[in-house]
Each structure stands twice: as structure tokens, then as C-alpha cells.
Image (cartoon, rainbow, N blue to C red):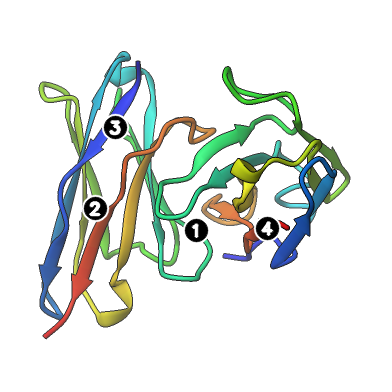
Amino acid sequence: QVHLVQSGADVKKPGASVKVSCKASGYTFTSYVINWVRQAPGQRLEWMGWINAGNDETKYSQKFQGRVTLTRDTSANTVYMELSGLRSEDTTIYYCARGGDFDHWGQGTLVTVSS
Amino acid sequence: QSALTQPPSASGTAGQRVTISCSGTRSNIGSNAVNWYQQLPGTAPKLLIFNNNQRPSGVPGRFSGSKSGTSASLAISGLQSEDEADYHCATWDDSLNGPYVFGTGTQVTVL
């Protein structure tokens, strides 16, 4: 069955960058986009962008444009989300999710930004 | 990006029917299909309803979705204790950069 497994929790200093991975299995990796979503405590889910794992096309939310970069490695069936210029309000859980309907989700990765 | 509006909470006793509303605009719900996600405490969201009213394999029939104009709703019939969770509506938006917008979330409590 479909699985999306994300990298573990990370702690970064303000101004640094973080790179979170999402390894896919159980389906043809290049047939779907992978989205990234984040959720701060008590807040609504927030879409950050997607990458087409087949042709490397990307689309980003205006809010994160210029700060987020999505890449993929087809040999490893893995998508990466890199967020730069970290600030305290980026402390939250980051999820990857498959396809236009977000039909399968990773387990989430907690990123903490603290000096 | 604008959010879709949901009531912050809803509740019912076991066996009751609970309905959650989701209000949007012409550029999001008015133009695109709505999905619903269930998020149990401490876990990732799970797709519950897609394309307004379709259930993925494995989702119980007591969950149903509908859409009319710029609003959508999720109904849970025969409420069960395991349905206690947060529920989020979502859809694509046709505005600049076409974001995927989520609702503000509704916490369902089984009394």
C-alpha cells in the first residue's frame, strides 16, 4: 500500500534553513504530485506548494514564494522541502501529501526554530 | 490566501447526526470540488471525502458530503465515539497562484 515516510524532527536557529524529506513507496512515484502542508498548534492547515514528481514542475503558495524550494530524487522516490530564513513562527509540523486530493499523508515532521 | 470558514466546534451524542458547514467564495468552492479530512488527535490528516461527495475505500458510509454554490457540508450519521476528531474542508482556489485552501477546522465532540 501507499506510504509516505518523512524525516525526523529537527531544531534550527533563526535565519537557518531546514530540509525535510518525504520518501514514497507503494505506487509509481512519478505519476503524482507531492504537496507540502504545515500546521501550527491550534491553527488551520496551510498549503505551501507542490512538486510534480514526474516532470519536476513546482508551484508555490505566494506566502512562501522565495523561501521554500521543493526538489525530488526519482532514484530514491523521495521529495524534499527546504525552507530558508527560518523564524520562530516557522516552528510547526510539516506534512507531505500525495496528489491533487491529498489522498495519503506522511506522519509529519516537527521543526523547531529556537536560538 | 483566504481560508474557508467552518464552525469551531460541533457535538452530539452517540447515534446522532452531526453536520459541519464550510463556507467559501466563487473562486474556490464555487469553482472546484471540495475535499474533507479527518484528523484524530496527534495524527496526520486523513482523506475522508473527495470530489464533494465521494468516499475513499475504507471510509464508513455514515460519512457523507455535499456542495451547493459556494458552500459545502459534511454529515456524520450515527455518530460514534471514534469520530471524535478535527474535520477540515479544503479545495483549490482559482485566484492568483491557485493555492489549496483549507477550512478553519471543526472539532467534533461525542457527548
Q: What amino acid is at disc 2? A: Thr
Q: Secondary structure at mark 1?
A: loop
Q: Are marks 4 and 1 on the same chain?
A: no
Q: Which mark is residue B109?
A: 4
Q: Are marks 3 and 4 on the same chain?
A: no
Number of the front mark, 1 or 2: 1
Q: Image quadrant for the C terminus of chain B?
A: bottom right
Q: Nearer the viewer, residue A88 or A61?
A: A88
Q: Nearer the viewer, residue B45 or A67?
A: B45
**Which chain is disc 2 placed on?**
A
Q: Is residue B40 left or right of residue B70?
A: left
Identity of the residue drawn at 69% across and 68% down: B8
According to the picture, the residue beneath numbered tag 2 turns out to be A69
- Give residue A73's position: percent from left, percent from top: 14, 30
Q: Which mark is residue A45?
A: 1
Q: Are marks 1 and 2 on the same chain?
A: yes
Badge 2, how many Cα within 10 Å: few under 14, some, many 20+? many
Q: CA distance from mark 3 to mark 2?
A: 19 Å
According to the picture, the residue beneath numbered tag 3 turns out to be A4
Q: What amino acid is at disc 1? A: Leu
Q: CA distance from mark 3 to mark 4?
A: 29 Å
